[in-house]
Image (tube, coloured by chain):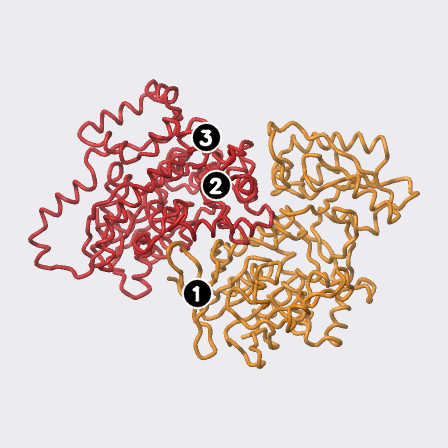
Chain colours: A red, B orange
Amino acid sequence: MGAGDFIERSLTQSLDHCIKCNICTTVCPVAAVADLFPGPKYVGPQAQRFRRADQPVPDVSVDYCSGCRACNMACPTGVHIAELNARARAQIVAEQGLPLRNRLIARSELIGRLGNGPHAPIANWALRQPLMRRTVEYALGIAREAPLPAFSASTFRAWFRRRERQMQPARRATQSRRQVVYFHGCATNYYEPHVGKAAVAALERNGFEVILAKQNCCGLPLISNGDFATARRYHEANVRKLLPYVRQGIPIVGTSTSCTLTLKEEAPAILGLDGPDVRLVSAHVYDIFEFLCELADRGELNTDFRPVECMLPYHPPCQLRAHRIGLPAVDVLALVPGLRLVESHADCCGIAGTYGLKREKYQIGMDVGAQLFAFIRDSGSDLALCDSETCRWQITHGSDVATQHPIEILAEAYGEE
Amino acid sequence: MTAYDTIVIGAGLAGLIAALRHAEQGQRVLLLAKGYGTTHWTAGCIDVLDAPETGDDPSAAIEALTVCHPTHPYASAGLANLVAALDRLRALCEAANYPLVGDLRRNVRLPTAVGALRPTCLLPAVMAAGDARQLPRAGSVHGTLVAGFRELRDFFPPLLAANLAVQGYAAQGAYLELPPTGRKRDFTSLTLARLFDQPEFRAHVGRQLRRLVKQNGYSHIALPAVLGLEHAPEVVRDLQAAAGALVFEVPTLPPSVPGIRLLRVLERAVIQAGGRLQIGAFVTQAKGRDGRLESVSTAAAARQQRHHAERFVLATGGIAGGGLRAEPSGELRETALGLPVRAPEHRAAWFSPRVFDGAGHPAFRAGVAVDRRFRPLDLADGVAYTNVVVIGAALAGVDPVREACLEGLALATAWAASDIG
């Protein structure tokens, strides 16, 4: 057992706090639309009583849990329902193996590497062809309609390195003392370098030198697909790469709410990784708006904004809510003259990382997201905001409204193009 | 980051009404709650006070209480605040097309899911026909049909009907056929409520009720409280029109659909008034100086999140709500701010020897003692924090469930405490 012991105990003991009130079931967006999912209470604390290392898995319906954590938020007695479900899924995978499809979509870094580069336009074109998508659906079980992001022709890291080389002499002259490590994650690196550029701009406008530390995929897609062994390796590798910085007290700031949540909490808690190094890294990780909010609290935020006259619908994604830090993007963007965010209050967009991509779950994801898509469409805006990448792709897919990371609007307010 | 005027802790009726009141006064309000609770566990009615001695008149009973038990929270809150809070709640529900009915001078007795009669004061209009005074007595030409679905656990029409019959009412139980839904798996109260919001579903149920009414001449129909989440009054109207009898809801075991309806009305009102709700925010620490509470911290991923405000409202409930917690050491602890709890000195004195003791159990009267302005007192009767008020079931000196005053207490104290200071 060893390091994971305490986490193990807190998870299994938390199920004894379940009073079977079913509040979790009433807030579960999947149980609301899917007959196949009996709800968090049943597959979580209830079924957990029958899950023992020496016995077969009692109920595979836990695989329909999307991992959105709405249950954890609503539970009045603090049961770690989502974590129990994630572990139960891993137990199924350990017994029955991981299907090829899940093995593939859980490796966002590998896919990113394959599609990224000068051939990206061709790959993107191919993935837009109905015949191709039907073939992929048939062969792999990835829903033909599911929103797949477009590969970028060059990576965020390549852009950053290029830029670093160009501005090296100038920077040496005005060396900033404050440093942050930017954790870009796979999506920014391979699909949306513009999010990373906006993040760098916002951080530099606040006098930070942005360090591009070595990093790898946070492992969340692996955790949610039940491949814990690989996810552990990923997280341990990230801890090794980030440790030299956090030992100097340099914070790690990310734009992907799911990567940052994994580094903070998901990987240690669900994978049972513990120890001083894991904890030290976790303690230094910030969502970018959480970080900017803290600057504002200390009166250190650069508020030299130009007005952005618009009202935008904003969806705080489940993975952000699971940080339990309120709505930092709303708080920071409230300082931009003219800008107003209207919060969605919808449960979930339905994509839940890789969940909504799967053939058998695509429609559930779309049904879950219906309320949010309607909210976005009804807003009349041609732009929506959301902190999480897969949610942005799903929102655009479901509502036909372009969706950006809130940091892009902040960069705009700072006068970046 | 935002500097709040008032932070409310707890998302039960007390916390929600307090948040609304402060937001409507133009304050910046943040409501923090560990999760949801009371609204999903209670019947969705407003119990003010069981009043057998005053002829079921809770307002007279509160006035009597003010004289006989001047330390009771109702005595500090005063009847006027209760009236004001009830009026506000009624107006809110009315505006949300979910009217409440009832009279502060007269309790109604409604059947529970096992057919016992319990007193309440304000009730959703969709439960009104269940007033026991109106239900047909044995020997009458009419009777009450108690209907339900086998697919809904913990609601047994024959049991409910038999227990009503024992009390002299004409009642019969029957199971209805669940309309085709395509669902094979589990049915919770909320699943059924969402189905009843669909016109075809309730039309199917209406036809079955019509047949039973024609055969047996029922004047009243009791159904589990699952008759719609968004459109309950419309569902009941449609069912009544189809069946040709009065239809009323009987609260189910949790999760309580009528409670969820109230929660939704209140949450929307708080948001509309400019308040912010942060659910999943477990307050674990409080920091004060010189008798003032400066901040509270909630458990977040990897760290604590700190929240500052001028004023704090503690509405975390009693033992059931999670505001008080029994420690293995034998102490009762107030979980959010660590305020001193008034409780029997020894664990042995928590409970009466008899489970159904008419006087209740001393442990359930435990809570935080307050001054007349609802500010928490330390064990020497000094004010612990001058900018904190404690409201609802977290208060000492009241056993809200046994006294049947859980919601009235929440409303009256929330209203009173937001007017002071």
Residue type marked 2: Asn
**Looking at the image, do the residues carrying marks 1 and 3 touch, with CB atoms under 8 Å apart?**
no
Q: Are marks 1 and 2 in contact (CB under 8 Å)?
A: no
Q: Looking at the rendering, in which quadrant would you find the N terminus of chain B?
A: bottom left
Residue A31 appears in the rendering: yes
Q: Are marks 1 and 3 on the same chain?
A: no
| Mark 1 element type | strand
Q: Is residue A110 left or right of residue B263?
A: left
Amino acid type assigned to the residue bearing label 1 in the image: Tyr
Is residue A338 visible in the rendered image? The answer is no
**Measured from the top left, where is residue B95 in percent x and y?**
61, 51
Q: Position of residue B274 (x, y in %)?
A: 48, 58
Specify the amino acid type for callout 3: Lys
Q: CA distance from mark 1 to mark 3?
A: 42 Å
Name the front one of labels 1 and 3: 3
Q: Which residue is mark 3?
A: A361
Q: Is residue A116 above or below residue A216?
A: above
Chain containing mark 3: A
Q: Which class describes the residues within 10 Å of circle 3: few (<14), some (14-19), or many (20+)?
A: many
Instruction: Using the image as rendered, state which of residue A346 and residue A175 is in the foreground.
Output: A175
Counting from the top left corner in percent of width and height, residue B268 is at 53, 52
Residue at numbered disc 2:
A85
Q: Hey, which quadrant is residue A110 in on the image?
A: top left
**Secondary element type, mark 2:** helix
At horizontal 47% and vertical 52% (from top left) the residue drawn is: A10
Residue at image position (27%, 61%) is: A301
Query: Against A111, is A415 above or below?
Result: below
Mark 3 vs mark 2, foreground winner is 2
> In front: B265, or A369?
A369
Label 1, on which residue? B4
